[in-house]
Image: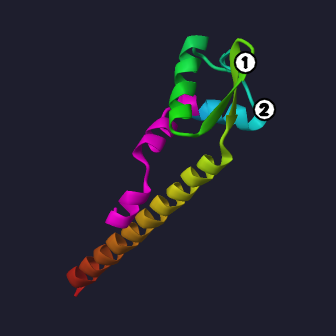
Amino acid sequence: MSAALAEKVDDDLWSAIGDPTRRRMLDLLLVEGEGTATTLSRHLPVTRQAVTKHLGVLDRVGLVRATPAGREKRYQVDETQLARAVAQLASVGSAWDARLQRIKRIAEAIQRTKQD
């Protein structure tokens, strides 16, 4: 990865997204528009307390915003931060595509040399 690309990639953000439970929570929040730890835990194979901890991680990296609602908090996806994550993923994907193309060209050159 280039130095410029490395600076653009937010490791904390990707660490948060790397967890399958948190990705599922983001999916649920995107579909429903919002949710609480209680409502999310009904759709996940983890406890409400675990959901609360996962939401805390997502909140710290800015992927969700919490709004107090009585004794609970309602969470919504921060679409700006999600768009940032998508842009980073696209950038990393492009960088890897370019690397793989370079490797392919080198391998093809080696193959041609062996055939000659």
Res 2 visible: no
- On residue 58, the disc is none
Q: Height in image: 101 above or below 89?
A: below
Residue 111: x, y in percent? 27, 77
Which range of residues does the magenta coloring cover?
A: 1-22
Q: Residue furthest bottom?
A: 116
Question: Viewed as shown, does residue 18 lie left or right of 80?
Answer: left
In magenta stretch: residue 2: yes
Residue at the spot 56% in from the left edge and 58% down from the top edge: 87
Q: What is the three-letter code of the residue carrying label 1?
A: Thr
Q: Quadrant of the C terminus?
A: bottom left
Tell me the residue that label 1 is attached to: 39
Residue 19: x, y in percent? 49, 32
Q: Height in image: 94 above or below 48?
A: below
Q: Quadrant of residue 37?
A: top right
How far apart marks 1 and 2 lie (CA) works out to 10 Å
Q: What is the three-letter code of the residue carrying label 2?
A: Glu
Q: Quadrant of residue 103?
A: bottom left
Q: Residue furthest right?
A: 32
Q: Height in image: 49 above or below 83?
A: above
Q: Height in image: 44 above or below 78?
A: above
Question: Viewed as shown, does residue 60 lie left or right of 96?
Answer: right
Label 2 sits on a secondary structure element that is helix
Residue 16: x, y in percent? 48, 36
Mark 1 or 2, nearer chain start: 2
Residue at the spot 41% in from the left edge and 63% down from the top edge: 96
Picture mark count: 2
Label 1 sits on a secondary structure element that is helix
Q: Are marks 1 and 2 in contact (CB under 8 Å)?
A: yes
Assess disc 1: are there few (<14), some (14-19) or many (≥20) residues with their C-alpha within 10 Å of its C-alpha. some
Assess disc 2: are there few (<14), some (14-19) or many (≥20) residues with their C-alpha within 10 Å of its C-alpha. few
Tell me the residue that label 2 is attached to: 32
